[in-house]
Image: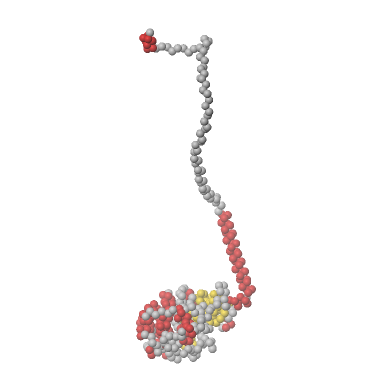
Amino acid sequence: MADMIGSMVGQYRIVDELGEGGMGVVYKAVDTMIEREVAIKMLRPEIARQPNLLDRFRSEAITVAKLNHSGIATLYSFTQQGENFFMVMEYVPGKTLETIEHERGALSWQIAVPLAAKILEAIQPAHEMGIVHRDIKPANIMLTTWGTIKVMDFGISRMVAAPRMTTEGRLIGTIEYISPERIEGKPADPRSDIYSLGVVLFEMLCNRLPFQSPSEFELMKAHLRDPMPALREMGCDAPLAVEQVLRTAMAKAPGDRYQSCDAFAAALATASGNLTIAKKDVVDLVGAGAVKEMGTAGHQFTPGEMPNMAAPQTVSGFAPAANLPAAAPVSRLSGLAPWLKANWKIAAAVALVFLSVGIGVVAGLARRHAQVDDNFPPQPPVIQPQPVPAPPPVPVAVTPPAPPPVAATPTQPPQTSPPSEPPSNGAKQSPKPKETKHEKSLKALDE
């Protein structure tokens, strides 16, 4: 469906084809609104025409969209355009584990075991939510260019089995990784994923599957009856403790396996001496080169695109990072620039619309602010108390200077006032006081 390149799906512009799987074709696209790269899976027409299958697919998409873990590729949207249905997912740059195995062969157990523990860590949250992947295999496990692991296509294989093409051209379904109970038609549960993860780890360690046959019927019989081959027989020098953990994970009866991804990961950590894998080791595995960067269920390469099979390497390790070119940088504007150049009028119109909306919002806020001011009368201004001035300093009393001495004047004899004249007869004299009897007695004695 190369004719989709350059077309628009809603706000997404398709810029490249990433791969093709059992559910449909996966494209790389750019969200023209926020300039984010995404992956878009277009469902096959035969799936879209089955209402029951489409409803189950939509319900599964709703559940998967609730997953929020750094090790799980995020589902953004499920949309319809015309008669076609699209899933918009997180775009993950890097390589699938399938591609790395084709390029490098077997991985050392010191790398494969902690890498499997990282995959288990990513799947555990989904199991806790009741979501079973049902299609765990190297094509659905991405190693990113920034050194992390992403599990792709959660729950999609519940609806449709996704076959894949090998280098020889043989069509082999995901029966290679399927658990015995699923072959018997029993419902899948988290222990089914644990069995599939055991097969994935076996393939990383030995560069081959535990059960191989050109017949799907013989493969199913092997999953049901045959024991897991010994790692030593496959040329793997992993410790016997690691092999025993692997046998438990691939037990035929679900009750004999590890009952959770956490339990499986804890057993691997104990058997390997708590080995871990650093981001640098993951980046070294990814290496460089033009790769199909989106892991899909049943990923297929176009003719002439299949990477060359690397010569089998010893189990002691893999090629050092110094021999690998640096990871190619990812430009987020690489897909947007050609579109802007070809559709500058549309871009300008969109910019004007956003500018108009912004101006309208600002004007509306201003009017609302003015209405609020009208509804509430202005408050009297708050009078701030003035500081009280300090009292003036009290003046200190100053003693006035003494007056100058007055010169002495000659003493004048005192003037005697003339004797007062007796009152004239005409003047009324005050009556004499009447003598008392005592006074009269004293006067008589004196005489």
Drawn side of residue 177 relative to residue 291, left or right: left
Does any portion of residue 28 appear in the rendered image?
Answer: yes
Drawn side of residue 67 relative to residue 444, left or right: right
Judge by depth and name the residue closer to the eye, 359 or 171.
359
Image quarter (top left, top right, bottom left or bottom right) of the C terminus: top left
Q: Horizontal and vertical percent for residue 357? A: 59, 66
Q: Is residue 413 above or below residue 378?
A: above
| Number of marks | 0
Image quarter (top left, top right, bottom left or bottom right) of the N terminus: bottom right
Q: Horizontal and vertical percent for residue 127? A: 42, 76
- At x 45% / y 81%, what residue is drawn? 281
Q: Horizontal and vertical percent for residue 226? A: 38, 89
Q: Is residue 435 above or below residue 143?
A: above
Q: Quadrant of residue 314?
A: bottom left
Does any portion of residue 182 appear in the rendered image?
Answer: no
Q: How is the image coloured?
A: secondary structure
Drawn side of residue 243 relative to residue 423, left or right: left
Residue that sits furthest to the right in the current view: 345
- At x 52% / y 23%, what residue is drawn? 410
- At x 41% / y 79%, what residue is drawn? 276
Judge by depth and name the residue closer to the eye, 68 or 414.
414
Q: Horizontal and vertical percent for residue 167? A: 49, 89
- At x 45% / y 77%, what residue is drawn? 71
Q: Quadrant of residue 365?
A: bottom right
